[in-house]
Image (spheres, helix red, strand yellow):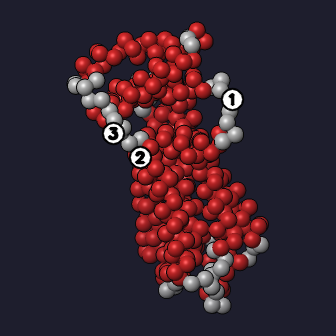
C-alpha cells in the first residue's frame, strides 16, 4: 500500500486518538489502551514500509505520548530504574545513532590530529599534558614502571576522584550543546587531542603496547561514554539548528530532555570505568591475555548497549499485516 493511501485510510483514527489523549480523563482506560495497541500496530507497519518517513515519525511521537498518558498516573514500579536502562532509554536512543556516529568520527579525527601534532612537534606533548606529568612519567620509565601513575593514589580515592571527574566532563559535553553543538565539539576536540598526544608519547618511548594494555582497561569504557555524552550535546545542538515541524523552543526543550536521558545512561558506565581505573588498572603485573579480555569485554558491552540493543529493540515486527 502506498504511504498516501495508508495515511488517508487511517488518519481519522489517529485524529480521534489524539483527541482521546487530550481528554483522557473522559475516556475509559480500557478503550485508551485498545486505541494505543492499534496505533502501535500502525507504527510497526509504517516503520517496515515507510521507514524514516514523516508518517513513521508522527506515529512514533503519537505512540510515545500515548504511553506516557496511559502510565503517568500508574504507581511507579520498584523496577522503574531497571526498566529505564533496559527498555525505555535504549529504545529511544535508536533515533540518535547518527549523532553518536558523528561524535565518534570527530573524536577519532582529533585523536589522529593529536598524534600527528606530537610526532611533528617535540614540545607539543608537554604543552598538552604539562611538564609535571611528562617529567613524572619519564622518571617512572627510568624506574622500569611506566604505569606507576596509577599506583600513586589509594584505590577508593582514585575511584571516587576519577568517577566524579568523568561525570563532570560528560555534563560539560552535554551542556555545551546549547551553543549549537559547537561547544560539545570543542570538548571532544580537547579530550581527543590529549589522548592522541598521550598515546604517541608512549609510542615514541617504545612503550605503546604497555600503555595500551594498561590504560585501555578503564579507558575503553571511559572514552566510549565520553563520546556518548558528546552525542547528547549534539542532540541538543540539532534541536536548536533543525527544529523540523516544531517551534525552535519546543525542539530545543525536546533536545534537552533527550540529551539528559543520554547523560543519565552514562553514569553506571562511568562508575564502572572509575572502579576499573581505581582497582584494576594498577595491577600492571596481570598477564596480557587478561588485560585483553577486559578490554574486549568492555568494548563489546558498549557496542551492545549503545548500538546493537537499540537497533534490536526497534526491529520491525515480523507479524505486520501487509493487507492493512
The quadrant in which residue 278 appears is: bottom right
Label 3 CA crowd tier, 10 Å (few <14, some 14–19, many 20+): few
| Above or below 78: residue 206 | below
Mark sitting on residue 318:
3
Q: Residues within 10 Å of mark 2 (few under 14, many from 20)?
A: some
Front residue of 289 and 220: 289
Cα distance between the residues tagged 2 and 1:
29 Å
Identify the mark at residue 127; answer none if there is no mark: none
Q: Which residue is drawn at 77% across and 72% down?
A: 154
Pick whichever of labels 3 and 2 is earlier in the sequence. 2
Mark 2 or mark 1, earlier in chain: 1
- Quarter of the picture holding the C terminus: top left
Residue 82 visible, this angle: yes
Q: Extreme bottom residue here?
A: 143
User: Which secondary structure lies at badge 1?
Assistant: loop
Check disc 2 and report its element: helix, strand or loop.
helix
Amino acid at each position: 500500500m502506498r504511504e498516501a493511501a495508508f495515511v488517508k485510510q487511517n488518519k481519522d483514527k489517529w485524529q480521534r486518538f489524539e483527541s482521546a489523549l487530550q481528554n483522557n480523563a473522559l475516556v475509559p482506560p480500557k478503550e485508551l489502551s485498545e486505541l494505543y495497541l492499534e496505533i502501535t500496530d500502525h507504527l510497526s507497519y509504517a516503520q517496515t514500509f515507510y521507514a524514516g518517513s514523516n508518517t513513521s515519525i508522527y506515529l512514533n511521537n503519537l505512540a510515545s505520548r500515548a504511553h506516557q498518558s496511559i502510565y503517568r498516573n500508574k504507581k511507579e514500579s520498584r523496577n522503574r530504574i531497571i526498566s529505564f536502562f533496559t527498555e525505555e532509554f535504549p529504545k529511544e536512543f535508536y533515533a540518535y545513532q547518527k549523532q553518536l556516529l558523528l561524535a565518534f568520527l570527530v573524536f577519532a579525527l582529533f585523536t589522529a590530529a593529536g598524534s600527528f601534532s606530537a610526532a611533528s612537534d617535540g614540545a607539543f606533548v608537554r604543552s598538552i599534558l604539562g611538564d609535571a606529568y611528562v617529567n613524572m612519567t619519564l622518571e617512572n620509565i627510568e624506574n622500569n614502571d611506566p604505569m606507576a601513575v596509577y599506583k600513586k593514589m589509594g584505590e577508593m580515592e582514585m575511584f571516587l576522584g576519577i568517577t566524579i571527574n568523568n561525570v563532570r566532563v560528560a555534563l560539560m559535553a552535554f551542556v555545551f550543546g546549547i551553543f549549537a553543538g559547537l561547544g560539545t565539539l570543542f570538548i571532544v576536540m580537547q579530550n581527543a587531542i590529549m589522548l592522541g598526544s598521550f598515546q604517541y608519547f608512549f609510542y615514541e618511548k617504545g612503550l605503546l603496547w604497555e600503555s595500551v594494555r594498561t590504560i585501555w582497561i578503564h579507558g575503553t569504557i571511559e572514552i566510549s561514554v565520553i563520546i556518548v555524552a558528546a552525542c547528547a550535546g549534539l542532540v541538543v545542538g540539532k534541536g536548536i539548528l533543525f527544529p523540523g515541524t516544531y517551534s525552535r523552543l519546543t525542539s530545543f526543550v525536546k533536545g534537552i530532555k533527550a540529551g539528559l536521558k543520554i547523560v543519565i545512561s552514562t553514569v553506571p558506565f562511568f562508575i564502572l570505568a572509575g572502579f576499573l581505573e581505581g582497582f584494576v588498572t594498577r595491577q600492571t603485573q596481570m598477564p596480557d591475555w587478561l588485560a585483553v579480555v577486559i578490554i574486549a569485554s568492555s568494548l563489546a558491552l558498549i557496542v551492545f548497549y549503545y548500538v546493537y540493543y537499540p537497533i534490536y529493540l526497534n526491529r520491525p515486527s515480523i507479524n505486520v499485516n501487509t493487507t492493512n
